[in-house]
Image (cartoon, rainbow, N blue to C red):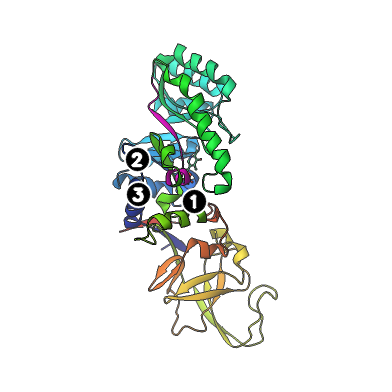
Amino acid sequence: MLSTSYIELSKKALKSNLQFVKNRLQPGVKLCSIIKGNAYGHGIELFVPLAEKCGVRRFGVFSADEAFRTSKVQQKKSHIMIMGMIDEAALEWAIENDIEFFVFDLGRLEKSIQIARQMDKKARIHVELETGMNRTGFEKKLIPQVVETIQENASFLKLMGICTHLAGAESIANYYRVKKQRELFHKIKRPFQNLSIKPHFYHMASSAATMRYPKAQLDMVRVGILQYGFFPSQEIRIESFQKIKKDPNPLQRILSWKSSVMSLKTVKKGSFIGYGNAFLASEDMRIASVPVGYFHGFSRSLSNKGRVLIHGHPANVVGTVNMNMMLVDVSHLVGVKPGDEVVLIGNQDESELSVTSFAGQTGEQMNYELLTRLPENIPRQITA
Ligand SMILES: *Cc1c(COP(=O)(O)O)cnc(C)c1O
């Protein structure tokens, strides 16, 4: 193995998470698997074919580069939908290759029509409406103009969807804001129903809304975090536990992150370990070096706090996390030797280190950020 650590993706876990989501969908609702942020850190190149094997046929990405990577590795004729950035050159590529994309301003709408006309192809657009998130989306007052433009250029467009995004369905504190958004969406989408080309799908729900507001599932849900085995928030997790008493842990983490012991040494009581005075040995200690540091995505904030698993037991990080390695206390373990497996996230024997414990704290939304920070260049492999 040339790399200092590797990531494993469990096919079984993904299958089970997708089934969990599907069990919660209203009849006929389509699932779009959201794989922006390098498939939430799991790795687009491995995740896409794996998800296709599990029956996924729709993917949502943020940008054209992610769509390009997806198109390179897809094995079926899956739909790819860009929800964010796409410049003019990429727009040509997208239209040429039947890649779907969000349209949320007149500039992009007009450009798409112009390119589609030149290519004699249909641009596959999802019209995003502003309902209260105030991020991207057509303002209500622009809708007549959008509808008219689409009507006039109907032969160059495939109206794949009319959509919006909810500003935080994972927190009950946003209940009224989200409710207003849902109401507004239903009101302002009406003019699109009278078009000669009918919208294929109406969609607004991410993981949280899919779980909490089944009526918001409309024709399609855009599910990210759930499929990777995490609830979008503690609230949604607790809420679903109340509904599914039989199965207290219905989602499974797909991802594991592993390395191995590089070297070992004994340190005398009273010595500082690592840089500076961050850690003082209060007794004789056995210390293992692990070739993973903040360069590899193991945060420096886990200095003296983080834990890893060795021989099925937790071992504490001692001193500061360095750029390329960390030191861990293995004084309590017998017979640790170079090459022994070190688990940074995942299971070893009966023990587990979750992504949240890896965060060192249990803040809302932490899973999203933590996962996507896992570097792209760590080798990834699929396990059963
Ligand atoms: C990221 C994203 C989603 C998926 O969100 P999850 O909470 O991970 O399910 C859905 N829609 C849009 C527009 C997004 O940006």
Image coordinates for residue 238, horizontal then vertical, percent: 47, 57
Q: Could you tell me which residue is drawn at 51 percent across and 76 percent down?
A: 315
Which numbered mark, 3 or 2, is in the foreground of this view? 2
Q: Is mark 3 within 8 Å of ligand 1?
A: no
Position of the N terminus, as image quadrant, is bottom left
Which residue is tagged 3?
Answer: 18
Q: Is residue 32 above or below residue 248?
A: above
Which mark, residue 94?
Answer: none
Q: Is residue 364 above or below residue 146?
A: below
SS of the residue at dot 1? loop
Image coordinates for residue 59, horizontal then vertical, percent: 40, 39
Q: 352 and 341: which one is in front?
A: 352
Residue 324 placement: quadrant = bottom right
Q: 79 and 151: which one is in front?
A: 151
Q: Could you tell me which residue is drawn at 43 percent across and 43 percent down?
A: 210
Is residue 304 shown in magenta?
no
Q: Tell me which numbered mark, 3 or 2, is placed earlier along the sequence.
A: 3
| Mark-to-mark CA distance, 3 and 2 | 14 Å
Mark 2: which amino acid?
Gln
Residue 325 placement: quadrant = bottom right
254 horizontally vs 133: left or right: left
Which mark, residue 232?
Answer: 1
| Mark-to-mark CA distance, 1 and 3 | 15 Å
Image coordinates for residue 377, horizontal then vertical, percent: 48, 53
Q: Could you tell me which residue is drawn at 57 percent across and 85 percent down?
A: 285
Is residue 203 shown in magenta?
yes
Please state the extent of the stretch shown in magenta in the rendering. 198-211
Which residue is tagged 2?
Answer: 26
Mark 1: which amino acid?
Pro
Total number of numbered discs in the rendering: 3
Q: Is mark 1 within 8 Å of ligand 1?
A: yes
The answer to whether the residues at label 3 and label 2 have Cβ atoms under 8 Å apart is: no
